[in-house]
Amino acid sequence: MKPTNTNGKTAPIRKVLVLVSGFSPRFNHIPSVRIGKLAKFLSRHFKVYVVGGLPKDVSVKHKIDVGNAKLIDISGLSLNKSNLSGSTQKSHKRSLLQKLKIFFGPLIMFFFPLSSGGAIYYRKKEYISAIEQVISKYKSHEVILLTSYNPWFIVQIGRYFKSKYDDIFWINDYRDLPFDNVVEPITKLKLFRAVAKWYTDKSDLTTCVTKEIEASLKSITSYPSKVMYYPNGYDLDDLPSVTVNDYDDIAADKLVITYTGRFYQNGTRELTPFVAALAYSMTQGSFDLFFNMPDLKGNM
């Protein structure tokens, strides 16, 4: 039943957003940033709750800014502490068991509430309980539930609530490609494509962090119009104010470029803009390029 105001007219339905992620904004990981920034900016206009995972033994040392959003942290069991710190470690040879875990990890996540890499074992029931409490509190509101892949159990929770409450608007957000992923060979199994199609068909909207993920999901779903590109943005609050004088010590003809992404052999990431910038720079004068990758070091 739609709420009415004192004049007997239909009152506008208020919205509450519940963002669900395996990684709380308090957790210093890349997935935490996307969910934290979504919470910050959406909380300017709506009531926002973030239900996210956080290992019990991880201390929060970085700055957290989620605006007016409310954080609900669900503690998880740390299974691999070396995978939680986010610190850079020297490369080492992986054992056969580690290689098997990495290879079969995406498949194991279908059946167990584990993070990618197996670092955290989540308490799925506590997630469901926390979300249920928010929904119960805002019965007169339109509930928008956003679930962030991966891990898979987060998507499963979205489907669970969409089945239970049909009037919930369910958004499934993909930071990574869930099938045919170049860094996860096992995802080339038809099972992953079928599961991704099923969840995409069942959700009300699917958002993708890259154009490549958007195109891949549109190619398999029965409802491509429900799939949209929603990239990461930037937060001006994270950028220090800079003046020209700050760069007086840098030669006027020197261009410094840093690429902080990853390169994958036979990967699908499009580096044309980056390479084009390098090519243009080389035509403008002297040029020094230094590259440093695990198996490829040197100068050009």
Image (cartoon, rainbow, N blue to C red):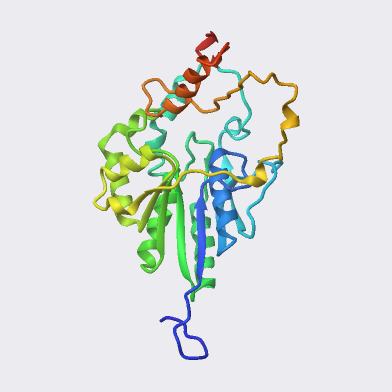
Q: Is residue 45 above or below residue 57?
A: below
Q: Position of residue 154 (x, y in %)?
A: 45, 50
Q: Residue at x 50, y 15 (%)?
A: 283
Q: Residue furthest bottom?
A: 7
Q: Is residue 131 visible?
A: yes
Q: Describe residue 212's horizontal placement relative to residue 257 as left or right.
A: left
Q: Residue at x 67, y 48 (%)?
A: 64
Q: Residue at x 55, y 27 (%)?
A: 260
Q: Position of residue 266 (x, y in %)?
A: 36, 21
Q: Is residue 198 above or below residue 267?
A: below
Q: Position of residue 40 (x, y in %)?
A: 60, 54
**Which of the pair 168/129 is nearer the observer?**
168
Q: Position of residue 129 (x, y in %)?
A: 51, 62
Q: Residue at x 63, y 45 (%)?
A: 236
**Which of the pair 13/176 is nearer the observer?**
13
Q: Describe residue 265's horizontal placement relative to residue 124 as left or right.
A: left
Q: Is residue 57 visible?
A: no
**Which of the pair 277/175 is nearer the observer?**
277
**Which of the pair 71/291 is nearer the observer?**
291
Q: Quadrant of the N terminus?
A: bottom left
User: For the image shown, how many numbered marks are present on the structure?
Assistant: 0
